[in-house]
Image (cartoon, helix red, strand yellow):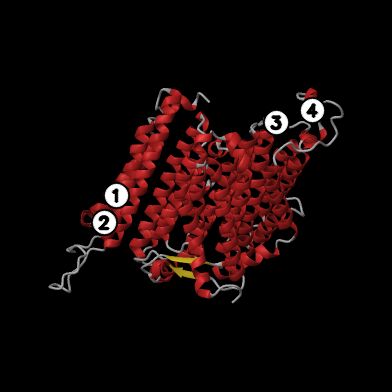
Amino acid sequence: MDLELILLNFPYVVAIILFSMGTLIVLTQANLVKKVIGINIMETSIFLFFIAVGNMHGGVPPIYDPAYPEALYVNPLPSVMMLTGIVVSFSVTAFALALIVKLYIYYGTISAPNFMKLK
Amino acid sequence: MDIIGMDALKVLPFYCVIIPLIASFCMPVLARWKKEFCAPLTTAVTAAVFIITIIIGNHVIKGRAISYAVAGWRAPWGIEILVDPLSAVMIMLISGISLCIMVFSFTAIKYELERIVTGWFYTAFLLCFSGMIGLVISNDIFNMYVLIEIAGISACALVAAKGTRLSTEAALKYLLLATVGSGFILFGIGFIYMITGHLNITFIAMELALIKDQYPILIWTTLSFFVVGFGVKAALFPLHLWLPDAHSSAPSPSSAILSSLVVKVYIIAFVKILFIAFGLEIFHETYIRQLIIVLAVLAMLAGSFFAFVQIELKRRLAYSTVAQVGYVFLGIGLGTPWGLAAGMLHIVVHAFMKTCLFLCAGAIAYQTGRKKVNEFAGMGYLMPVTMGAFTVAAFSMVGIPLFGGFISKYGLALGSLEAEMPLLILVIVLSGLLNATYYFPIIGQAYFSQDESTGDNHGGDKKKFKRDDIPLSMLVPIVIVALGVIYLGIFPGTILKFINLTVSVLL
């Protein structure tokens, strides 16, 4: 692989590694709270990816300054979209934790295999 | 122009989304004050949206799509709402079926849910409703993602509303897997935004047509992310794991909404992204088509087989949904005019059939408390109207002529001939036969076998028709959706006209 290309695009590489890790945690961990953490890792990696998409090398914050009309601005749209993404991630986490508390009251454990076989 | 002017008409789709959204925020407050007002208000809101969608449909059938820029921001920057004929028929379907289910929920909710969660049930329903309608008519992929999450999370809440151990567990499973799915969708949206710089589907299509040869690997990646994401959301076969638990443990109005509408709106979103944003060339050049067909065939056979081995009625119906989603995806995978049109028609037909079946299951559990498929002896005489509707929907599910399911399966068969894959007809027939093996024993038992277990309760001649002992608010919706199934089987023309208007543009 071209090492320089990877170094230049390291936010993307990190995002993809984090995304894979998060998905793996959700699917393989037995502990329900760990599953929720996995989801958060996954969504955070997506936020990183979007913000890396919006970034420009040598860009400045997108606030119009009359002194430098030709300035190179960072694309603000992906960051704004990720605000919505954070809200979604927050509400999913809150809802999942509420359900886990309820399951803990029913079963006395938060380990998924322990009650999956009780059915 | 008929009743209202063009300017007013353009805003109407926006109201379809915003009215239920506002009503859903009022609902918790109302529930604290007067619990009994929640159901009528929700029904009124749904009915109002249904009337609006019919006005929209009346306009769109003339071949003019409605486009509206939300808050006045024009297309590449702002959020665009685009109602093409396919979206129009889908919003009519969503609001019409929801109206029936809401009328049904008048009594069913009192019986199935604790009193304290009634208000929250209607809150979640209205949120889900506005999310579904918005998802179908939105033309902006990031807006689609937000609406996917609104519909998805509130759908989980609809499952969790019952509050039992099983439904809480199912809701958590649904929530976790659905979030993984929407994570994949969001990542796909990120890829699209990276290579095109647009979020509006129309503009993505124009941009992708120019640059698709530069980024072949990225387009492959994006497509596979979308297939996985929407596959989890729409319960395409190997990714369906959350569906049987969620649909069988939810209260019966929720099961009907989830099974007939929620899984379908994701398919519409997928069709829009696949055929409009990516376009036909990418669809034919990549192997996406073969992948979808293989998964659909697996779903049709495996879903029916799993349904066959279930004993609980609602679980059997849930697995049957997995198989029916396979039919819809088969239509998408074929990608021929008849195939795609039949796939879309199957969404409509299946919404009617599955609503009917789940509402019948709810009504049967309400009157007799029976939930297993081997307890149906004598049911045809105990509850003739409900069981009659059940029979109509089951016949349609199997694909017997004169019922809606026949038309869509016939269309799929024609589509597979058009796509020169005649072997698929065999799969369609086989899956139909499998459907018969798990629906006919229920019907046969209901009409032709003696009721031994509860013989004492009603005594006398067992082969005598009695009146259904369920409230009118349960009976009327069941009869209406059953009549809808028959109507679609005899006069599918109107719906097909809507669908073909869109399909002829897509293909």
SS at mark 2 in the image: helix
- Residue B153 seen: yes
| Residue position for label 1 | A15
> Residue A52's mark?
2
Q: Residue drawn at (70%, 61%), measured in percent from left and top?
A: B492
**Residue corresponding to mark 4:** B451
Residue pointed to by mark 3: B368
Q: Using the rendered image, report if marks 3 and 4 lie on a common chain.
A: yes
**Amino acid marked by disc 3:** Thr
Image location (x, y in percent) of residue B462: 84, 30
**Image mark 3: chain:** B
Same-chain status of marks 1 and 3: no
Q: Tell me which residue sits at (25%, 52%) in the image.
A: A11
Q: Is residue A28 left or right of residue B11?
A: left
Whichever of callouts 3 and 4 sits on the residue coming sooner in the sequence is 3
Q: Residues within 10 Å of mark 4 (few under 14, many from 20)?
A: many
Q: Secondary structure at mark 4?
A: loop
Residue at (73, 32) in percent of width and height: B376
Residue at coordinates 50% horizontally, 32% vertically from top-left? Answer: B163
Left or right: residue B6 versus residue B443 is: left
Q: CA distance from mark 2 to mark 1?
A: 9 Å
Whether labels 4 and 2 belong to a single chain: the reply is: no
In this rendering, the answer to whether A69 lies above or below B420 is below
Give SS at disc 1. helix
